[in-house]
Image (tube, coloured by chain):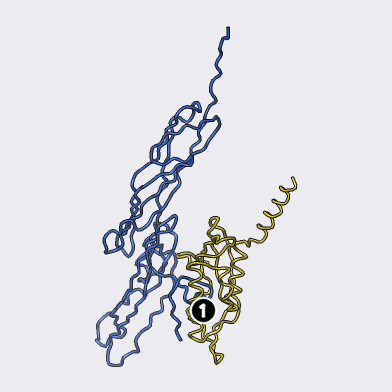
Chain colours: A yellow, B blue
């Protein structure tokens, strides 16, 4: 009986540590907004990781910095591992080294997105993130 | 400054403006979307001022932006709508709005102005395989007897029109997997215990599609569709009366 209790406790603790898909996305957006690339390895994998690193590389090459926060809304589970949401970049600006606002004028500000969550070892990570084509936000 | 970055989307990519929709054919998990793009070069010669006495000029109806379904009209309702440039009254529209052309600077030497304007239009055709029907025979019998299950194995072709050109998608059934663990379009199954059971098949279709002006693209992907659910009753065995002497 005692062992059963210990087992349950361990199992529950394990579950509590596992973030939900929504929390994972929040953490990723926060890391991306703040340029904390070191956290990407814990949050992303596969093509999602490559895309995120590449976008930051482009930003560095162009000597741009992001101000403001990326947000999301309308988060839904389309399956156990796939989730859809709208990414809102309307509160972000791209600023160059001289302080000029170089945010692309034609940039879509509400983007229908989908992401896939996969388990890598003991942790969940976002393995794919892409635009949800022909959808609206 | 134009930042043009093409990659699968990320948060920073979206901030850079690199997450934009592109027009191509997508085989999703449940549907196929064919997107075609056309650049329209609308050129018209319109007589704005006539210096020739006696000639009567009737102005054509103005250009408007006409909202139609992506199926190309207003009759067949589809997922999305598009705006097309057309003469007012020349076609039925879901809604109309003013079209503002970008005319060339007027020339004082000519009475004829050419208005040219180009725009890129996208039209999409989206389709999915119809749900295959599954059957069982009989639906009720003793649990130790064989139930025969089968599911439709017919190819489906869905066609539509993009820019007045035909596009087609063909779904070819390739495999069927039953919820009780067996595979095949026609299978037998013994439940082995009594009770009510539900069963359905998941049919995997090979997707072929034919875009505008190009040959068929064969085996571009696959889509799995669940059949209807079947309710089966596996009856308990009848009691036997034995005389023990």
**In the displayed structure image, the side of residue A14 where residue B83 appears, left or right:** left
For image coordinates 36% across by 65% down, the residue present is B91
Above or below, comparing residue B120 to residue B244 in the picture? below
Farthest residue to the right: give it: A2
Looking at the figure, which quarter contains the N terminus of chain A? top right
For image coordinates 58% across by 75% down, the residue present is A38
Count of numbered circles in the view: 1
- Whole-percent x, y for residue A78 in the image: 53, 57
- Whole-percent x, y for residue A14 in the image: 66, 58
Residue placed under numbered mark 1 in the picture: A56
For image coordinates 59% across by 82% down, the residue present is A67
Query: Is residue B185 or residue A137 the one in the foreground?
Result: B185
- Whole-percent x, y for residue A106 in the image: 47, 79
Chain on which label 1 sits: A
**In the displayed structure image, the side of residue A89 where residue B23 appears, left or right:** left
Query: Is residue B151 or residue B76 the one in the foreground?
Result: B151
What is the quadrant of residue A125 in the picture? bottom right
For image coordinates 54% across by 65% down, the residue present is A126
- Whole-percent x, y for residue A79 in the image: 53, 55
Farthest residue to the top: give it: B245
Rate crowding at label 1 as few (under 14), some (14 to 19) or many (20 or more) other CA atoms within 10 Å. many
Above or below, comparing residue A79 to residue A34 in the picture? above
Query: Is residue B103 or residue B163 the one in the foreground?
Result: B163
**Which secondary structure, mark 1?**
helix
């Amino acid at each position: 009986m005692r062992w059963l209790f210990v087992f349950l406790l361990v199992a529950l603790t394990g579950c509590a540590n596992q973030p939900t898909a929504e929390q994972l996305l929040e953490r990723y957006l926060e890391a991306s907004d703040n340029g904390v690339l070191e956290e990407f390895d814990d949050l992303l994998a596969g093509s999602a990781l490559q895309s995120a690193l590449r976008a930051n590389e482009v930003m560095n090459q162009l000597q741009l910095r992001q101000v403001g926060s990326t947000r999301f809304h309308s988060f839904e589970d389309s399956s156990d591992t796939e989730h859809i949401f709208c990414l809102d970049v309307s509160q972000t600006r791209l600023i160059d080294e001289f302080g000029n606002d170089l945010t692309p004028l034609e940039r879509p500000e509400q983007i229908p997105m989908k992401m896939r969550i996969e388990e890598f070892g003991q942790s969940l990570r976002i393995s794919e993130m892409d635009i949800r084509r022909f959808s609206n936000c | 400054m134009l930042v043009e970055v093409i990659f699968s989307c990320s948060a920073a990519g979206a901030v850079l403006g690199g997450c934009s929709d592109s027009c191509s054919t997508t085989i999703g998990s449940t549907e196929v979307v064919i997107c075609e793009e056309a650049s329209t070069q609308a050129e018209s010669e319109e007589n704005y001022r006539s210096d020739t006495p006696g000639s009567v000029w009737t102005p054509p109806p103005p250009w408007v932006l006409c909202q139609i379904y992506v199926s190309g009209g207003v009759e067949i309702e589809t997922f999305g709508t598009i705006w097309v440039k057309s003469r007012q009254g020349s076609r039925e529209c879901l809604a109309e709005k003013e079209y503002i052309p970008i005319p060339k600077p007027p020339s004082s030497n000519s009475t004829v102005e050419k208005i040219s304007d180009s725009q890129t239009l996208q039209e999409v055709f989206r389709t999915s395989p119809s749900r295959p029907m599954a059957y069982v025979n009989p639906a009720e019998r003793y649990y130790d007897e064989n139930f025969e299950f089968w599911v439709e194995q017919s190819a489906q072709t869905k066609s539509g029109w993009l820019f007045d050109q035909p596009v087609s998608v063909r779904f070819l059934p390739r495999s069927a997997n039953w919820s009780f663990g067996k595979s095949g379009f026609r299978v037998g199954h013994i439940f082995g215990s009594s009770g009510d059971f539900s069963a359905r098949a998941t049919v995997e279709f090979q997707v072929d599609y034919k875009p505008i002006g190009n040959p068929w693209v064969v085996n571009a992907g696959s889509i799995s569709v669940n059949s209807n659910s079947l309710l089966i009753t596996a009856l308990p065995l009848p009691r036997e009366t034995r005389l023990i002497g």
